[in-house]
Image (cartoon, rainbow, N blue to C red):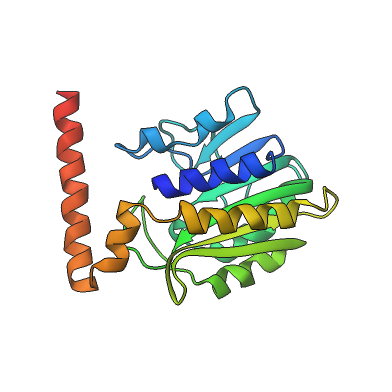
Amino acid sequence: MRGTIRKLVARLDRAFPLPEPIFEFGARSVPGQEQRAIRPLFVGRDYVGCDLQPGPGVDRLLNLEQIELPDASVGTAIALDTLEHVERFWDVTPELQRVLRPGGIAILTSVMYFPIHEHPADYWRFTPDGFRTLARAFDAAVIGSAGLTDFPHTVVAIGIKAGGDPTAAPTLERALHQWSRRDGQGLKEWLTLLLPPALLAPAYRHFTRLAARRRGRSVG
C-alpha cells in the first residue's frame, strides 16, 4: 500500500467515523510495507483483515468476486489499490452493496498510471469514469482522483448504501477533496508523473529490487 492511500483512509475516518464492522479486502501486508497497514488506525474497533491469500494482516480468506458474508453484515468495506488485481472486477461493487448494512460505506482506490505490480497478478487500470460506472451499484457515490486532472495516478470511489446519515456523502466528498489537494502526492506519485514511461518502468523495477535488498539486510 502507498502511504498516500493510508492518509486517505485516516482523513475520511476523521471526517466521518467509519461504521463497524470494518472489513478490509486485500489486507495482506506486502514485505516492506508493514508500516503502511491501516489496521493500526482502527485499534479498539471491530476490524477484519481479508485477502485471497493467508499472510500477515489476514484474519479471514474472502474473495471480492463472491464474498462469503451474509447480506447487510458489513459497516465499512475497504479495498485499497486492490481492484486492479481482481480478474472479474465488475462483480465487486454489487457484492459490496449486498454485504453493506444500511448506511454502510465502501472505500475503493486503484491506480490509473502506474507500473505493473503483481500481487499475485495485475489485470486492469481505471479512469474516474470507469470508477463512476462501477459505483452505480451503490445508492450514492463520491468519485475523486489525485494527480493531473487529465492523467491521474489514482482514482477513488466512495460508495454509500441508503438508510444512514444523509450528511455522509457531502462530508466524505469534502474530505476526499482535501486529501487530493494536500496528501495525494507522495514521492512515488511525483515520480510517476514526472518520469516518461520509458524511464518509469525500469525506475520502478530498480526501486522494488533495492527495497528487497534492504529488507534482506535488515532480516540478516
In percent of width and height, residue 158 lies at 64, 56
Q: Residue at x 43, y 38 (%)?
A: 28
Give the residue at the far bottom of this rendering: 150
The vertical placement of 53 against 98, above or below, is: above
- The quarter holding residue 219 reads top left
Q: Is residue 197 visible?
A: yes
Residue 25: image x %, image y %?
54, 44
Quadrant of the rendered image containing residue 193: bottom left
In the foreground, 174 or 41: 174
Quadrant in which the C terminus is drawn = top left
Count of numbered labels shown in the rendering? 0
**Residue 19: quarter of image:** top right
Q: Nearer the viewer, residue 167 or 218?
A: 167
Task: Provide residue 31's location: percent of width, then percent of height.
Answer: 30, 37
Asked if residue 95 shows in the view, the reply is no
Front-lying residue, 87 or 212: 212
In this rendering, is residue 113 above or below 35?
below
Residue at position x 20%, y 42% in the image: 211
Horizontal relation, residue 103 to residue 22: left or right: right
Residue 56 is left or right of residue 66, and the answer is: left
- Residue drawn at x 57%, y 75% as measured from the top left: 129
